[in-house]
Amino acid sequence: MYGSLDISTSGMIAQRTRLEVIAANIANKDTLLNTKGQYEPYLRREIMFAPGDPGASDERARGLGVHVVSIDANPRALEPRFAPGSPYDQDGDGYIMAPSINPILEQVNAMDAVRAYEANVAAAQAQKTMLTQALRLLA
């Protein structure tokens, strides 16, 4: 009976996680050091979804919805950046490797995630309204 609510809930959880990954990418777009203070540029994170919802309450709903499979760091998400005199210039040519994160692209992805989240909220609200009306008919 609550399968469609589980589907919408799984979509909301997936999009919320996507927004968290996007926020982390934007926040770390200039990060060059790891937590120990060593030179290790931040690698852009990418989220992977898969169909199905292993955490659904209804057995039939587990094949529906969406879930996060992984959040991976893209090792190719670095670009050379001219920074003469930087202590992290390993070749002495004035270039360091820095995160290749485009804030505009990340914001577009965030807008897409917000809209998908809102669509799942609307679907859940519609389902709740239909369930309420069905219960009124039975009463």
Image (cartoon, rainbow, N blue to C red):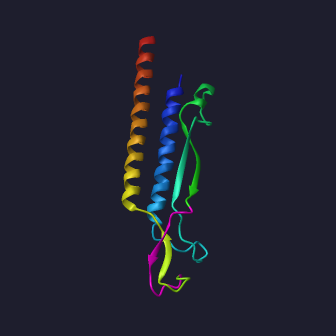
- Of residue 73 and residue 78, the one placed in the foreground of this image is 78
Q: Position of residue 20 (x, y in %)?
A: 48, 54
Label total for image: 0
Farthest residue toward the top? 138
Q: Is residue 83 above or below residue 11?
A: below
Residue 119 screen position, x and y as percent: 39, 37
Residue 79 highlighted magenta (yes or no) = yes
Q: Quadrant of the C terminus?
A: top left
Is 22 placed above or below 139 here?
A: below
- Magenta span: chief secondary structure: loop
Q: Name above or below for residue 135 compared with residue 37.
A: above
Across and down, in percent, residue 54 comes to 62, 36
Which quarter of the rendered picture does the N terminus lie within?
A: top right
| Residue 69 appearing in the image | yes
Residue span colored magenta: 75-88
Q: Along the horizontal axis of the image, is 114 left or right of 57?
A: left
Specify whether residue 139 is in view: no
| Residue at (41% x, 56% y) in the render | 106
User: Does the stretch in magenta take in 76?
Assistant: yes
Measuring from the top left, give residue 69's x and y in whole percent.
60, 45
Residue at point 40% right, 18% down? 133
Identified at 53% across, 32% down, the residue is 6
Image: 34 above or below 74: below
